[in-house]
């Protein structure tokens, strides 16, 4: 009998259980990104595992729900109501969107021309590095979208300049280092 490629190691249930993120107890925040309060961009971000892909680095609700380190990727989920999504943005890594609940319209800039297509649950799209993309939930109830970002360093999100001005007017400021400062939401 040949030897296994990977040596056998103990993986007790308590170790494996630390690698489980249960939906009922997920931590997340509606103030993860600079555009989080801009009309049409209201959403909740859940970092599930891996690189902390968020601009609000001081909010403990945005730490990955699975504490074990994952090298070179981030899996997250966004949740929002009809008509909401993100502002146009780009990353220095690839990104994948897969609707889990509801129908989503995804947009991108093609040499300055806005294009779009519709994704149904479990459809998937992979965005190339540097492609400005965004999405809107067009279903009913709350929609949920799985996001996967690759690479050893996800970097910070790049936005179009006019969207940054709209975000700052809501009380969220983008700092020079790519993090955000969040003022208390106005009642």
Image (tube, rainbow, N blue to C red):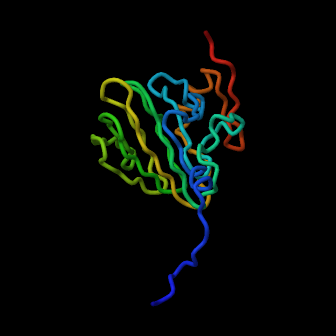
Q: Residue furthest top?
A: 187
Q: Position of residue 123 (x, y in %)?
A: 30, 48
Q: How many marks?
A: 0
Q: Position of residue 98 (x, y in %)?
A: 37, 46
Q: Position of residue 175 (x, y in %)?
A: 70, 37
Q: Position of residue 18 (x, y in %)?
A: 61, 50
Residue depicted at x 49% and y 26%: 42
Q: 119 left or right of 55?
A: left
Q: Residue furthest bottom?
A: 1
Task: Reply above or below: 51 against 41.
Answer: below
Foreground residue among 102 and 87: 102
Q: 53 left or right of 103?
A: right
Residue depicted at x 61% and y 9%: 187
For the N terminus, give its image quadrant: bottom left
Q: 61 left or right of 144?
A: right
Task: Reply above or below: 96 against 121.
Answer: below
Task: Reply above or below: 9 against 137.
Answer: below
Foreground residue among 69 and 78: 69
Residue depicted at x 69% and y 22%: 183
Residue depicted at x 44% and y 25%: 40
Foreground residue among 156 and 96: 96
């Amino acid at each position: 009998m040949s030897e296994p490629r990977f040596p056998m190691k103990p993986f007790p249930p308590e170790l494996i259980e630390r690698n489980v993120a249960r939906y009922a107890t997920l931590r997340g925040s509606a103030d993860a990104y600079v555009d989080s309060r801009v009309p049409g961009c209201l959403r909740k971000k859940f970092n599930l595992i891996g690189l902390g892909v968020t601009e609000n680095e001081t909010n403990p609700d945005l730490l990955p729900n699975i504490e074990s380190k994952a090298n070179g990727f981030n899996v997250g989920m966004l949740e929002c109501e009809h008509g909401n999504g993100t502002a146009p943005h780009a990353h220095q890594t690839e990104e994948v969107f897969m609707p889990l609940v509801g129908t989503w319209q995804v947009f991108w800039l093609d040499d300055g021309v806005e294009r779009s297509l519709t994704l149904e649950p479990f459809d998937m799209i992979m965005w190339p590095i540097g492609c400005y993309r965004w999405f809107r939930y067009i279903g009913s109830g709350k929609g949920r979208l799985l996001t996967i970002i690759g690479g050893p360093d996800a970097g910070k999100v790049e936005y179009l300049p006019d969207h940054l001005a709209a975000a700052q007017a809501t009380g969220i400021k983008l700092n020079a280092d790519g993090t955000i400062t969040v003022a208390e939401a106005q009642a």
